[in-house]
Image (spheres, grey):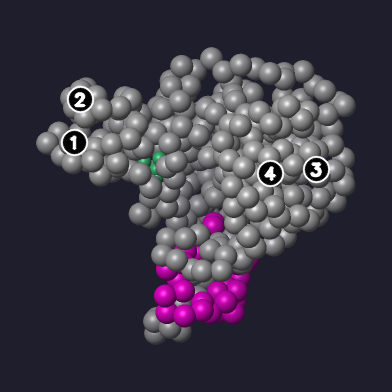
Amino acid sequence: MVPVPHKEFRPQAVLYPPAVIGVFGSGQLGRMLALAARAMGYRIHTFSPEANSPTGQVTDREVCAPYDDLDAVRDFVRQVDVVTFEFENVAAAVAEIAAQEGVPVRPGGHVLHTTQQRLREKTFLAGAGLPVTPFAAVRSEIDLATAVARIGTPAVLKTAAFGYDGKGQARIDDAAQAGATWANIGRQEAILEGFVDFEREVSVVAARGLDGSFAHWGVIENVHRDHILDLSTAPAAVDPRTAQEAVDLARTVLEQLDVVGVLCVEMFLDRGGRLLINELAPRPHNSGHLTIEAAATSQFEQQARAICGLPLGSTELLRPAAMVNLLGDLWEAGEPDWAAGLAVPGVKLHLYGKQTPRIGRKMGHLTAVAGTIEAARENALRARTALTARATGQK
Ligand code: AMP
């Protein structure tokens, strides 16, 4: 079981604005955290190897250095009041250095350690009695053959470390493919999972405060395309019992991991109505972006509140909402027609300030709020289509 370092409420740990929040990672999650935290009067520093990053464009300070430049990490940590991350593949040494310097890391290094490696994460979940897909550790071709024999096909082989958005994943439909698939993912430590013929995918984005308080935005429904999140809607069209169960699972995860901050639990709802946890993200999550417009407190403001020791804000969902991602593919036929997209009622545009639109790269998103989930979904999709309608001649 994961160690539980700080259960009791520590009022001295509350950080009031203009305290400095230090973020490791510099993508869109850091950017939206920075925008929310700055609205509250906090100052933000970001650390990553990238210059003019999505986060760095809106922070007080942008430090560009590799994550393993431990002198640069120490120098960075000394100038902030709390450390957080928007990207879980940051070396555990970062959390150790912060601890040496007496700077709190929220969520703690133990959360990073558990969630940055799929085998550790699944082993933690199964050990906590939480429902997960059947899985096995794979460290050799023989392990893989044994795992395929036990779990059966279809199955999914995923690299244990550094996987996201379907990267480092391959499906195995037939035991005879196993050897080739092992070679395809680079013969590195991996996890084999049973393939879930799910009815739908859902997530619960939740937060835990320094005092152990818990808040969640209910169940969000997610549709992936090519392993990348495409569409999220809230509230999810699931029955109340399933919704309660999903929230209870999330609460258990945040408590068992002793999280301070926001964490997303991604789940499959299988055809038998059973929830299975697929993945944890120990930070604000793409499926929670719609909370910016749809909820009383966004996941980003909540992250700032939680890591600074303030009370969690209300997570009341004010209106049904839908979010669609804008990938680099949209730019293939030229600059999207922003005016056409924004002409759709209730639609808001978020662009992350990335310089080069590449295929599959998350460049921004649109959120639509409306009176019903269906109207929100339709408006978000219509707005995205309108962005490229002129270039492709579509109506
Ligand atoms: P992941 O990187 O593990 O979040 O996977 C990305 C997406 O791939 C998921 O959201 C699913 O759509 C799909 N996927 C991953 N693992 C499985 C599985 N065991 N069974 C079915 N689909 C999966």
* Image coords of residue 363 (percent x, y): 53, 63
- x 24%, y 24%: residue: 143
Q: CA distance from mark 4 to mark 2?
A: 42 Å
Task: Tell me the element at label 4.
Answer: helix
Task: Find residue 142 and name its label.
Answer: 2
Whichever of callouts 3 and 4 sits on the residue coming sooner in the sequence is: 4
- Disc 1 residue type? Ala
Q: Is residue 297 above or below residue 282?
A: below
Task: Find residue 332 and name its label.
Answer: none
Query: CB under 8 Å between callouts 4 and 2?
Result: no
Q: Which residue is mark 4?
A: 72
Query: CB under 8 Å between callouts 1 and 4?
Result: no
Query: CB under 8 Å between callouts 2 and 3?
Result: no
Q: Nearer the viewer, mark 3 or mark 4?
A: 4
User: Which class describes the residues within 10 Å of circle 3: few (<14), some (14-19), or many (20+)?
Assistant: few
Q: Ligand 1 closer than 8 Å to the CB at disc 4?
A: no
> Bounds of the magenta span?
322-348
Task: Tell me the element at label 3.
Answer: loop
Q: Which residue is mark 1?
A: 178
- Asked whether 323 or 139 is in front, the reply is 139
* Image coords of residue 264 (percent x, y): 56, 38
Q: Nearer the viewer, mark 1 or mark 4?
A: 4
Q: Which residue is mark 3?
A: 79
- Disc 2 residue type? Ile
* Image coords of residue 205 (percent x, y): 58, 40
Residue 346 forms part of the magenta stretch: yes
Residue 377 forms part of the magenta stretch: no
User: Which class describes the residues within 10 Å of circle 1: few (<14), some (14-19), or many (20+)?
Assistant: many
Q: Quadrant of ligand 1?
A: top left
